[in-house]
Image: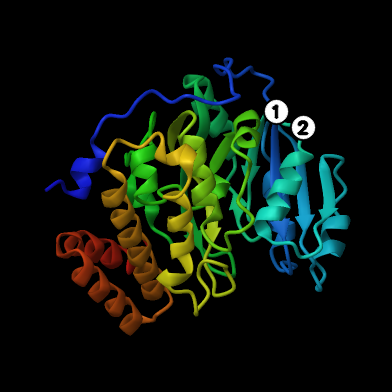
Amino acid sequence: MSTVDDLLDLPTAPPIAPGVHDPLPVSPAASVSVVIPAKNVAAYVGETIASALAQDAVTEVIVVDDGSTDDTIAIISAVADPRLHLMTNDSAGVSSARNLGARHASGDWLVFLDADDRLRPGAVAALLAAARRTPRAVLVYGDYNTIDSEGRQIGRRELLKGRRKPSGDVLARLTSGNFIVNGGIALARAEAFHAVGGFDVSLRYCEDWHCWCRLAAIGEFAFAPKLLLDYRLHTANTMNAALRTPQDFFPAIARIFDDGLILARLPEGAAAGLRQAAEIHLVTYSATQAIRFGRYREAFGYLGMIGRQSPISLPRATVRVALACFGI
């Protein structure tokens, strides 16, 4: 019987991008639009916008307010920079907000930055450099570190120097688990993003993972091994809220493995094993987040779920949970 690792090593056919021609080399004048969905983030949005406007090659920052009732809009409106544009989305949800911003973006590339995170200096330049080295890439991504609600670094991911994540045809690996994690570390080719239809507004969680999988089905990815983002972990995060469970995320798995574009590009017979790996990935993720927020009994319960479903996966999941104790 094939293991999940065996399935991930199976060859796949070259990517074919429907409606997207062979990408042209990335010009020195390539433009980047940063799209920021925002709702009740007055405590953070000013810092987030400043981090985006400080990036070279960012020609516009589009903030889409999704029904804020605090001072979010006032803070955005006070920023005096012609590259900043404010739109409203009437509480239609984060995916709808991102899609709205992307439809009005003029850049060749898109960054989807959460309104409580911040780009590190030189992040966009590093992503564009990786894109120039991989002209067929439809998405280029890097890595992140974590900060707390006060902006203090709590992650220790700099200890992972030299770590490599997948490049090239990444679809099989990506369907087994979202190794991108946060859209703020990714630069998506605008043409390709629109070709796959953007974010699925029917998904409440992991909608970005589904979108990345559709992009991986039509083109190559490239990894830039640098820490590009400060990812804020606090209980108000959508993915980190105290009541989130793996079951909240499973609809995204069902959507991924019911998507004709994705299934057509997976190796024959691999979908079942990759789906199991995806489920284990999300349970492991839930366990690591529980550890980070001191919910230890909950974390051990999730490890028990993994052990019952796939004993062979338990050692790796346990290591990941242990590393989360040290901010890795």
Mark identifier at residue 106: 2
Q: Are marks 2 and 1 in contact (CB under 8 Å)?
A: yes
Q: Secondary structure at mark 2?
A: loop
Against 72, residue 267 (above or below) is above
Residue under label 1, please give it. 31
Q: How is the image coloured?
A: rainbow
Q: Is residue 95 visible?
A: yes
Judging depth in this view, the residue of 276 and 155 nearest the camera is 276
Mark 2 and mark 1: span between their CA atoms? Answer: 8 Å
Compared to residue 106, the image places residue 186 above or below, namely below
- How many numbered markers are drawn? 2
In the foreground, 98 or 228:
98
Number of the front mark, 2 or 1? 2
Residue 68 in the image, given as x and y percentages of width and height:
79, 68
> Badge 2: how crowded within 10 Å, few (<14), some, or many (20+)?
some
| Residue under the image location 69 percent in, 42 percent down | 34
Taking the spot 61% from the left edge, 48% from the top edge, the residue there is 199
Q: Is residue 44 above or below residue 59?
A: below
Mark closest to the chain's N terminus, 2 or 1: 1
Q: Position of residue 63 (x, y in %)?
A: 77, 51
Quadrant (top left, top right, bottom left, bottom right) of the C terminus: bottom left
Mark 1 is surrounded, within 10 Å at the Cα level, by few (under 14), some (14 to 19) or many (20 or more) other residues, namely: some
Q: Quadrant of residue 311?
A: bottom left
Could you say whether the residue bearing mark 1 is in a helix, strand or loop? Answer: loop
Q: Residue at x 57, y 48 (%)?
A: 184
